[in-house]
Image (cartoon, helix red, strand yellow):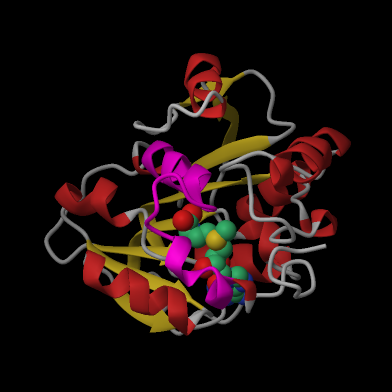
Amino acid sequence: MTVTGLPRNDVRQYDVLAGQWWLADGQFAMLHWLARARAALIPPATRPDAVLVDLGCGGGLLAPHVAGKGYRHVGLDLAESALRVAAPHGLAPVRADVARIPLADESADAVSAGEILEHVRDLSTVVAEACRILRPGGVLVLDTLARTAVARFVAVTVGERIPGGAPPGIHDPALFVDRRRLVAEAARHGVPLRLRGIRPSTVGMARWLAGRRDRPVRMIPTWSTAVIFQGRGVKQ
Ligand SMILES: C[S@@+](CC[C@H](N)C(=O)[O-])C[C@H]1O[C@@H](n2cnc3c(N)ncnc32)[C@H](O)[C@@H]1O
């Protein structure tokens, strides 16, 4: 059963959940924690007019974390409702499918793919598109869920039952990402990716689950990429 009554991974769920994006202790709480960790991988812009393209930007949670880095922040999403929420946070909103990005080749200095790859049906096309719009020397950063039994257990079986974990039905574990395939696809398009696992800090998560939700939970590196992982690579 999904929280919205819609099928798993149906993008219309984001319309139903549109009021949740900026609630720090709401249904998308963990996306706030992940946005902070993702932004830490995005270097400051190295030239005027640098562009950061945020694939599947949702409500724009990345915006405050990259605001001082010198980019024009362009957010792409299929959900109009999410773009409406995102726009006041300083992104230029573009309604588009990440499998068909309406931007020129090598037009982005940085591309962020935060919690989007596990939602797409054609991983190869989306990775190719992300790499296509990146200029040589530009950086691709991403975080997503691994295609493993443990990720399915943590993100769906458990995650959908704990506050801040994930809205029930938002994920279809059949779309979770094969790490080897992801790395191979990015390399094929000129972006050698390095992956690392991340997880919520134990103390932070314990506080959170105990109902002390006054501050975000820190996401920290971990040895295993089998659940949530980040990727970073520079286009050759
Ligand atoms: C889990 S949310 C992540 C949002 C944001 N990146 C973040 O981390 O806060 C996934 C977002 O991707 C969008 N999305 C899903 N499939 C998409 C597609 N094919 N093209 C563009 N956006 C898509 C959804 O509308 C939603 O806003």
User: Residue 191, how many percent across, how many down?
Assistant: 54, 50
Task: Name the dominant secondary structure of the magenta segment.
Answer: helix
User: Residue 122, how many percent across, how many down?
Assistant: 74, 70
Q: Residue 224 or 168: which is nearer the viewer?
A: 168
Q: Quadrant of ligand 1?
A: bottom right
Q: Is residue 66 left or right of residue 170?
A: left
Q: Is residue 119 left or right of residue 129?
A: right
- The magenta stretch spans residue 19: yes
* Region of the chain picked out in magenta, as a range: 14-37
- The magenta stretch spans residue 160: no
- Above or below — where is 77 with respect to 111? below
Q: Residue 199 or 6: which is nearer the viewer?
A: 6
* Residue drawn 54% across the image and 77% down it: 15
* Residue drawn 64% across the image and 18% down it: 223
* Residue drawn 71% across the image and 35% down it: 227
Q: Is residue 128 visible?
A: yes
User: Residue 88, how many percent across, how many down?
Assistant: 23, 71
- Above or below — where is 185 with respect to 208? below
Q: Quadrant of residue 39?
A: top left
Tell me the quarter of the image containing the N terminus.
bottom right
Q: Is residue 154 left or right of residue 204?
A: right
Most extreme residue toward the left is 48
